[in-house]
Image: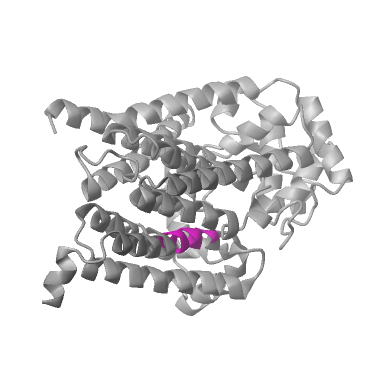
Amino acid sequence: MSLRSVVVFALTPFAVGIAVLGLYLLFSYSTLGRDNPRAVAQVVKAFKKGQLVEDPYQHPSTTIGSHQWNDCLITMLAVDERGDRLRLALSPIIADFPQQPEASLNPCKGLKALVSGAALDPALYHYDRYVHGAAALLRFLLPHFEIKRIRALYRAGLTTVLVVGFGLSLIGIARGIRVREFAVMATTFLVLLRFFGLEFFSQSLGHGPADSVVALYALAVAAMLFAPSGPLLAVGLASLFGALTVILELFTGGMPLGFAMVIGLSTLAVRAEARPQGVLLAAWAAAAFVIAAAVVYLLKLLAIASLEGYAVIADVIQRMRYYSMAAETGLDVRAFVGQLAASLGGLVGGMDLLAWAAVVGALLAGCYGALSIYRHVADAATRRQALLLVLSVPPVPLWFLVFANETGPHAWYADRLFAWPVAAGFGLFLVSVIARRQAPADGLSQSRSA
């Protein structure tokens, strides 16, 4: 690669992160002061119709969704427009109720108190730890649609993207072009459709938008397979994926899931003759994913710090430490594993046995596929593809361990991250089968048998 190409590759995630953050802040600012009374009326109606409820945990609801805590929190952030408009565009407000302490501890009770006109603490607490794209999006939609309709839009949009991606992958396989790559994509879409807890979370006001970004990235890769591109597009797409993920993320696993998917999928739709290729390109794309997300997040924090002081940065660091296994409480390994195991059924509509069969079966199938390719397939492209699928799996368990005090208690939605190891394992199995059928007696197998 020339020095110019290296500079372009290096600057791409920074440019994408800055551009995405700028567009988001413009969007967030434009959603404020539009028709807040109408939005509040929609929330009041939602409580009357049972579309929002005061119990924040609704396991395992397939109508209003399991995660009412986040739904109520995001709705509260969306409809409370007190304070300076510019400051609200950066971070929304969490209302506090001095005369109703229980409402301050439960976002669903808090939301109901807020729209009912309860007395509020005049001091404004801005929720600065996240970027809150889901709240801005809801603020835009709420004056026009009731909560039930917004949930239906999220669910229909996410499902449509996944079904279209699966259909494109089947078309690619049927046409006999890049069959291994399209087989990996078909497996990815099928796993996301069945083993990503869509029954409980696709309608969520928090999970729905973030999950749609995951689906759109996979769809983009599948579409690009029909006309493979250069490495720069793969890096740019990964950068966009990272920036949008951190904007919509509420520490529900979007970052490790996206990072793992970029490692496994980013090189599939890159021209075979392009450079860099293989592990180097995947590492570049994964780094771009993280850098773009970091640019968005850190610039947002710095903007807040310039207005309010640097306490917000200390707060974020303290919270990350609290979530990690370095927390003062330490890590109870037995309890942690038990929490993950008990919630695994959330992957697939509460069907625990099927969830376990998928995870264990994918692990066994992936091991078989990796060993088969190592022993019998000499094609360098296939071996690189297999290696990247193998390398894409460890980020998920590593995330669980590093942030054990967050993922353990929240395993009922954090377990959805196991969807990627399932996709990678079965995808690797298919790659090995297809590769051996295409070249059943290559030089490597002959040399090993000799």
Q: Is residue 143 left or right of residue 26?
A: right
Where is residue 118 drawn, in percent x and y? 82, 39
Where is residue 304 drawn, in percent x and y? 47, 31
Q: Residue furthest bottom?
A: 334
Where is residue 303 drawn, in percent x and y? 44, 28
Q: Can residue 90 be seen in this view?
A: yes
Which residue corresponds to the image point at 45% horizontal and 69% vertical from the top-left?
Answer: 362
Relative to the observer, which residue lies in front, 99 or 246? 246
Which residue corresponds to the image point at 24% horizontal and 48% vertical from the top-left?
Answer: 278
Q: Which residue lies furthest to the right in this view?
A: 48
Does the magenta segment cover residue 421? Answer: yes
Relative to the observer, which residue lies in front, 352 or 267? 267
Q: Is residue 119 visible?
A: no
Q: Quadrant of the N terminus?
A: top left
Does the magenta segment cover residue 248? Answer: no
Q: In this view, does 239 lie above or below 57?
A: above
Hey, which quadrant is residue 142 in on the image?
top right
Relative to the observer, which residue lies in front, 389 or 286? 389
Magenta region, mostly helix, strand or loop? helix
Q: Is residue 350 above or below residue 280?
A: below
Which residue corresponds to the image point at 53% horizontal and 48% vertical from the top-left?
Answer: 166
Where is residue 49 drawn, in percent x and y? 88, 45
Q: Which residue range is magenta in the image?
A: 416-424
Model colouring: one colour
Q: Quadrant of the C terminus?
A: bottom left
